[in-house]
Structures are given as structure tokens and as C-alpha cells.
Image: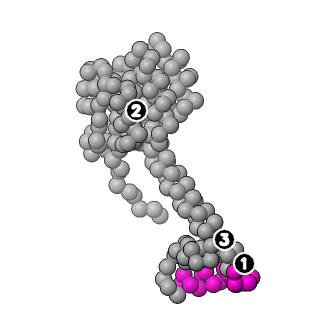
Amino acid sequence: MKKEKKPSVYSVMVITDDSKISSLISEMLPQYLFEPVIFLDDVQEARRMSMDLPADIVIVDAGNGSGLDAAVDLSETTGTILLLVPPSQFDEFSSKAESYGIISITKPLDRFIFYMMMKTACAVQCKIKRLTDKTIRLEEKMEEIRLVNRAKLLLMQQLNMSEPEAHRYIEKEAMDRCLKKTVIAANLIKTYG
């Protein structure tokens, strides 16, 4: 049985020039779950900031339509994007946004629906973080395999070892010297490469 994890804290970026929306969202985001919460009214500044300091959840006010373009741009990050749209444009905006993984919500904000969408965004972020971690581990493993294979090939060429002998040599060196196989492989590549 898995033990329960404590709830994560999610960073939030809100992009809107509507002070009513800003204050309402500020009221509805509990600090124990969402911190920091950054409010921006300039789409260009939000784009720049998201490159340096990506937020877990980005809430974009569609406004006059420019918010949709910003949401699409920001969908390239690992953040979950929520797009606030007027009810009259919901179908049009949401159909464009869905293909980018953007969740649309109608304005004015209903507290319960907004809360449910934020909880959905949190769940999506948990999944994204797990998949990102898994991807990083797989990439590291692939890099280790490439490095070790390159070192084995050099041992086979330079010292006339068979593939199993080269493999055993790298493993034994790593074990004897209490180092990772990648460190041993990198040293062998420097020596024989």
C-alpha cells in the first residue's frame, strides 16, 4: 500500500488586464496550495517570464482574442493552461484551444467550477511531472548505454577484448572503484578515444 503524499504547492501565473478577474482569482486560490501567484497584464511580459520561470498553472484571460494566441504560445511549456473566455465565444475558442491541450472556462467565473478546474489542472500537473521525471530517467539511461557501448567498442578495438570481456571490465571497474559505469566509460573514452 502506497503511503499518502502531502499536497504539492503549484505556481500560478495569471494573465489579465481585468482587475475584477485578478481580485476574484486571488481570493479563490488558497496559499497552501498555490504559491507564488503572479499577476501580469502584459502578454509579452508573460511570454518572457514563462521562458525563465515557467509556472505550473497559467490562467489566461482571452480578452479580445489576443489571450488565445498567448495561451497557444504558452502551451509549449509544461504548465497547464486555463483559458477564460466569454460564453458567447466559448465554442469557437475552446475548439481551437483543445488541440493545444488548453482547458477553457467561461467568464464570469463561477467559484465551484473554477475550483474544480484548478483541481483538474493540479492533477494534470502531477501527471506531467511524473512523465517528465520518467522521460529524464529514460534519457539518462539511454545516455549511459551509449557511453558504455562506446567505451566497450574502444576496449574491443584497442585491447582486443570480446564484447562480454569489455562489458565485464567496465562493470568490475565501476564496482571496485565505487563509481558509476558512466564515469568509468567516460575515463576509458578519454584514454582510448
Amino acid type at image mark 2: Arg
* Residue drawn at x 39%, y 17% as measured from the top left: 63
Badge 3 crowding class, 10 Å Cα cut-off, few under 14, some 14 to 19, many 20 or more, is: some
Q: Amino acid at mark 1?
A: Gln
Residue 27 appears in the picture as rendered:
yes
Dot 2 corresponds to which residue? Answer: 47
Task: Say if the magenta span includes residue 168.
Answer: yes
Badge 1: how crowded within 10 Å, few (<14), some, or many (20+)? few
Quadrant holding the C terminus: bottom right
**Magenta region:** 157-175
Q: Is residue 100 above or below residue 66?
A: below
Q: Give the amino acid at mark 3.
A: Asn
Task: Determine which residue is flagged by label 1.
Answer: 157
* Residue at the image point whose x is 26% and y is 31% from the top: 26
Residue 121 to residue 23: above or below: below
Disc marking residue 149: 3
